[in-house]
Image (cartoon, rainbow, N blue to C red):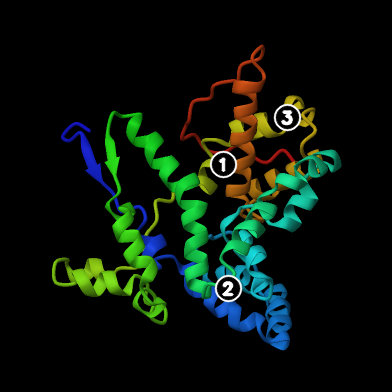
Amino acid sequence: RSGVTVALNGDGGDESFAGYDRYAATRIADRIASFAFWGSAAAVLAKLLPDSIDSKNGVRRAKRFLSVAHEERPVRYSNWVAYFTGARKKELYAPHFAEAVAATSWQYWMENLWHEVDNLESVDAAMAIDIKSYLPYDLLTKVDIASMANGLEARSPFLDHVVMEFAAQLPVHLKLRGRDSKYLLKKTFADLLPVENVRRRKMGFGVPIAKWLRTSSRVLLQDTLLSKRARERGYFKPDRVEHLVWEHLAERADYSFQLWNLLMLELWQQEFMDPCAPAVKYKQTESPAPALSA
């Protein structure tokens, strides 16, 4: 913002030109699910594969894929893009809370969205779902908050309706060829960009949440999610929340994104639903993590 008032971004490019790994994955999963034997074999293999606390671990990624490859598209997609699977929610939700949100759950919404794209090829269907959900309610919201908080206006050329309509009419093989994503874009602009940029692996905007929760944000995590205040809301089973916290802190599992979601929800509750008891403000530190107390 110190140099410009308007900036261009690439939002929408992945959703219209098949840029995410899950598009190739959903095509493969469709083939697996079409044969009962392969679907069953995938589920068994997923249980046999070891897990890892490294989110980029190849075996962990394979396990996540195989564990739902045999499922119907809505279930499979929800497990890939949501941090809490259906099974995890059943373990975590208090009975009355599970009943209260059942009719408005993410899964229910996803099933309705997928019903709208039943007639599309698997990759086109997944992109359509992202355009209706992930793009407006996650990516564009994030960019709008971050840019406007600094007085910067963001523009998204790929979201021009003419570009999106053109992309939607293209055959899938011009967007995804094998595992080569955004095929047409790369071919079109290859002579205008450095080769290393065109061929580089996709890189997101991830931050080290797993490390933060074990170090600089550890006190905030424990004092917030394990507090009496959080327990008494009655949304979640306290023992399951404790399990997630301690397993993560002990580095026996990586529940970073699940814990981040729970942490943000509780802080939001304290800020907006508990007006008489404002949330405690914590300052990030880089001090070593204290020893486990449980």
For marks 1 and 2, give the CA distance. 25 Å
Identity of the amino acid at label 2?
Ala
Residue at figure coordinates x 66%, y 56% from the top left: 252
- Of callouts 1 and 3, which one flags the residue occurring earlier in the amino acid sequence? 1
Residue 233: quarter of image: top right
Secondary structure under badge 1?
Answer: helix
Q: Mark 3, residues whose alpha carbon is within 10 Å: few (<14), some, or many (≥20)? A: many
* CB within 8 Å, label 1 to label 2: no
What residue did someone put label 1 on?
Answer: 213
Left or right position of 108 against 8: right
What residue did someone put label 3 on?
Answer: 230
Instruction: Residue 151: give its label.
Output: none
Q: Nearer the viewer, mark 1 or mark 3?
A: 3
Residue at figure coordinates x 37%, y 56% from the top left: 12
Looking at the image, residue 133 lies above or below residue 282: below
User: Who is closer to the viewer here, 41 or 169?
Assistant: 169
Residue 229: quarter of image: top right
Furthest residue in direction right, as rendered: 95
Q: Mark 2, residues whose alpha carbon is within 10 Å: few (<14), some, or many (≥20)? A: some
Residue at figure coordinates x 72%, y 56% from the top left: 86
Left or right position of 211 against 18: right
Instruction: Residue 62: give its label.
Output: 2
Q: Nearer the viewer, mark 1 or mark 2?
A: 2
